[in-house]
Each structure stands twice: as C-alpha cells, then as structure tokens.
Image (spheres, grey):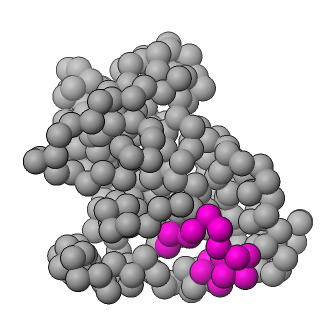
Amino acid sequence: MLGGGRRVLLVDDHPLFRTGVRRALEGTGRYRVVAEAACAHEAIDAADVHSPEVIVLDVQLPGISGLKTARILRRKEPRARLLLVSLFADDARLLEAYHAGVAAVLPRDLPPAALVETVDRVVAGEQPLLALLGRRPGLAHRVRADVRLLPGRHPEAPALEALPLSTRELAVLDCAAQGLSNKQIAGALYVTEQTVKNHLTSVLRKLGVDDRVGAILHAVRHRWVEIGPPGGAEAEWLLADPNRPALARRTVA
C-alpha cells in the first residue's frame, strides 16, 4: 500500500501473523505498514528509518524479548503508540507491559475487526491497558501511584535529553544488564563482538564510569534498563520480588 495513513511497524517472528495484521490494518485505509521485523535488532533499525507512529510487537521474540524491545523502541520513538501481542494476560504480565510503556495488550487470537478497533482507540489517545489495570483491585493502587506523577505521560519515561545513549548503545546495555556476555549480545543483535565492545566503550565514556557493572548500575538507577533473566516468557513477565527465588539464567543462542 503506497497511500497515506499512519505509519505502522509490525514486529513478530511469524510471517503469516504479520501478513494478517497488515491486511487488517491496511484494509481500513487509515494505516500504512511501513516496515516489518522478526526480531529486536530489525525493529530498532526499522524504527530508525521509518519513525513509526504505531508499533505492534509480539512479546516472544528471538533474542531480546518483546517487552525489552518495547522499552528500547519507546526511548527511540517516545510518541509512537505501542501495542503488545501476547498469549498471556495475568496481572503480573499486564503490569510489566504497562511499565514497558505499552498502551494495549492484544490476545494473539484477537479477531481482525477487534484488533483494528483497539489500534484505533490507542491512536485516539486511549490507554486500554491502563484502564484494565485500574479495574483490578490488586493493581489499582500501584497504578495510581505511577499515573499521579505526571498526567498523560508514562511515569517511567525520562525526558528525552536525559538519555545520552544511542538506541543501539541502550540495546547493548540492556543485554548486558540481563547477564549476557559480549558474544551472546553480538548474537542477539546480529553484530560482531568488536562492535559490541565498541558500543560498551562508548557507553562507559558517556556515563563516566569505569566498567560495565558501573554502567549497568547507572542505567538501572535512571530506569533505562532493568536487571533480569534474558528471553523466555516466564522470565520476562516476573515482577521484581526480593522474596522470590532467583531463576536460573537462560542464554540467547
């Protein structure tokens, strides 16, 4: 489709699913899918080129997961509307999605008409996920503590000028915060180990720290990244709980 409409980026590692979403959105004449991506590094590159207004991404991506990808894309495109596709929708997972800057969570088997309706609502400024969390007693008080900080703006989003790192540097640092080695980061981002080292050197210089541990602690304090196990639905959805036994880390091939 070469006409107008809001620019959409689809991020999912299943081509048939992307095709279905593309047809549903472009069939309305209101949306134009400008790029498709099957993993985090493709999504980051596509966002750099196309500046999407709407991003629909799957939670289970190879390498860096959908939620971590959402956090990175949100820093890159703070005005883009993020919608997450997930098979699961328990309280912990919904709250984690909210903290990643997601406006709505879409069941993977959602009918095309309902998918389009949800995208329309999000584009119009609604936050279906926030409304859903507010209706759940166990989560409402936690959400209210966040949204009261700055109405209309997600509480975790720093001012854009407060983030001195490039999108790729943030992606590398995010991987490092999950305990990945340089080799594993290179595999997740489809770059060379030397490129990873170069990015880390730049990160250390920009943050004024001596090593990657210092860089990770700096980024965590500023809420740019989170420390946690990489990949996998179970690890990605866990809330930070000091009383919960630590999961064994899983590496990215």
Q: Is residue 135 above or below residue 57?
A: below
User: Which residue is outermost to the left?
Assistant: 243
The magenta-colored residue range is 104-119
Which residue shows up at 45% across the image and 52% down it? 67
Quadrant position of the N terminus in the picture = bottom right
**Residue 138 image point, x, y percent:** 21, 76
Of residues 153 and 187, the one nearer the viewer is 187
Q: Is residue 168 visible?
A: yes
Q: In which quarter of the image is residue 190?
A: top right
Which residue is the extreme one toward the top? 194
Position in image of residue 146 (x %, y %) = 23, 73
Q: Is residue 159 visible?
A: no
| Rendered location of residue 167, percent (x, y) | 48, 42
Identity of the residue drawn at 65% across and 68% down: 109
Residues 191 and 66: in front is: 66
Q: Give percent across and percent down for residue 179.
A: 32, 27
Q: In this view, does 14 lie above or below 108?
A: above
Q: Which quadrant of the view contains residue 232?
A: top left
Q: Magenta span has 98?
A: no
Figure quadrant of residue 6: bottom right
Left/right of residue 56 with respect to residue 96 in the rendered view: right
Q: Could you tell whether 120 is left or right of 100 in the image? A: right
Q: Is residue 113 magenta?
A: yes
